[in-house]
Image (cartoon, rainbow, N blue to C red):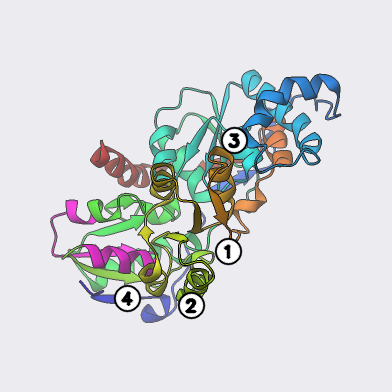
Amino acid sequence: MPIAGIYGREDFGTVVEQPAAVAHGRVSPAREARVLPRPSLEWTAEIERATAPVYERVKAVITPVEWPLMAPTIKAINELKVERNAVILAHNYQTPEIFHCVADIRGDSLQLAIEASKVKSDVIVQCGVHFMAETSKLLNPDKTVLIPDRRAGCSLASSITGADVRLLRERFPGVPVVAYVNTSADVKAEVDICCTSSNAVHVVESLGAPMVIFLPDQYLAKYVASKTSVKIIAWKGACEVHERFTGAELRSFREADPSVQIIAHPECPPDVLAEADFTGSTAHMIDWVRNKRPKRVVMITECSMADNVKAELPDVEMLRPCNLCPHMKRITLAKILDSLLYLREEVSIDPLIAEKARRSVERMINLRN
């Protein structure tokens, strides 16, 4: 069904921004005593032997020249995880040395949210962007949740505020609101339920309403609208990575090699999805490649995911249009090491906002289960 309407901040006039729900601190005074000594990061024969099994996971995408620069930090991080009783969560867009070499839990936003709700460790290090760290904190209010770089934001999350949601509710009274997880805790506190690209259609239809407000990604909203009879009111947000792809770009790949398979994320514009052989979330895209084992494939999403799949499936040739997320790439091995050494940057959420936001995330998780 076509989109019933699409709105942006300009449609409501000036909106007063809400105070940030999340505070970050470099090292809190209460934790100063828990700062650990910095390990040696020298490349030695011992490091080479100890990290050889880890290198086997990534040798298809990380050269032998690069490995000595990464291995000492990888070994130090894996040892610090034990000392801190910490777990590392990594999104599919993280680079291979993080995704395959230090992460304990890997996946898309839905997988990470579900696994975050089960974590038993004292410390969670979120290798992703800030809304993912917020989600982990919402589901683990009594645990220490860290994000290695507090500047790791998201164009979608920054496109809408809780105040915007309240104005949408005023314009469309009684219409339920679904928020993509790519939103701040402030926004999640104002909506009925969250969703990810994996379960968006299911979440929308689960509400049993003829019309639903879906925010903030306008392209994911259009994709959902094409898959359901529910009328969708959308928000004018977009992912700065996926929005840059074009249908013409995909056609050029086919002209160069008609046998190439093209799979795309639903955050891409409609003309891109129209050219794709398969559309799905990052987890669904990875599963598609595992099951189909195409000879050559183009993954129309953040390009580090192609490296992560290539590491697992070296026989599949990946063509990389390579749009990088500048926010995901703020997370590095060096920053993860510092995060564990100094317990920085810790994520906290206003308790009043957290209580309401937690409900919308838990509704999503419970719906799936």
Q: Is residue 253 visible?
A: yes
Whole-percent x and y of residue 257?
A: 51, 66
* Disc 1 packing (10 Å; few <14; some 14–19; many ≥20): some
Q: In this figure, which residue is indicated by the disc labeled 4?
A: 6
Q: Label 2 vs label 1: CA separation?
A: 13 Å
Q: Is residue 222 magenta?
A: yes
Earlier sequence position, callout 3 versus callout 1 = 3
Over which residues does the magenta segment extend?
Answer: 204-227
Horizontal side, residue 275 vs residue 82: left or right:
left
Tell me how many marks there are. Answer: 4
Q: Label 2 vs label 4: CA separation?
A: 25 Å
Q: In this figure, which residue is indicated by the disc labeled 1?
A: 321
Q: Label 1 vs label 4: CA separation?
A: 29 Å
Whole-percent x and y of residue 246?
A: 48, 74
The amino acid at mark 2 is Ala
Choose mark 2 or mark 3, whichever is in front: 2
Earlier sequence position, callout 4 versus callout 3 = 4
Choose mark 3 or mark 1, whichever is in front: 1
Q: In this figure, which residue is indicated by the disc labeled 3?
A: 100
202 and 250: which one is in front?
A: 250
Are circles 2 and 3 on residues that touch, CB within 8 Å?
Answer: no
Earlier sequence position, callout 2 versus callout 1 = 2
Horizontal side, residue 22 vs residue 175: left or right:
right
The amino acid at mark 1 is Pro
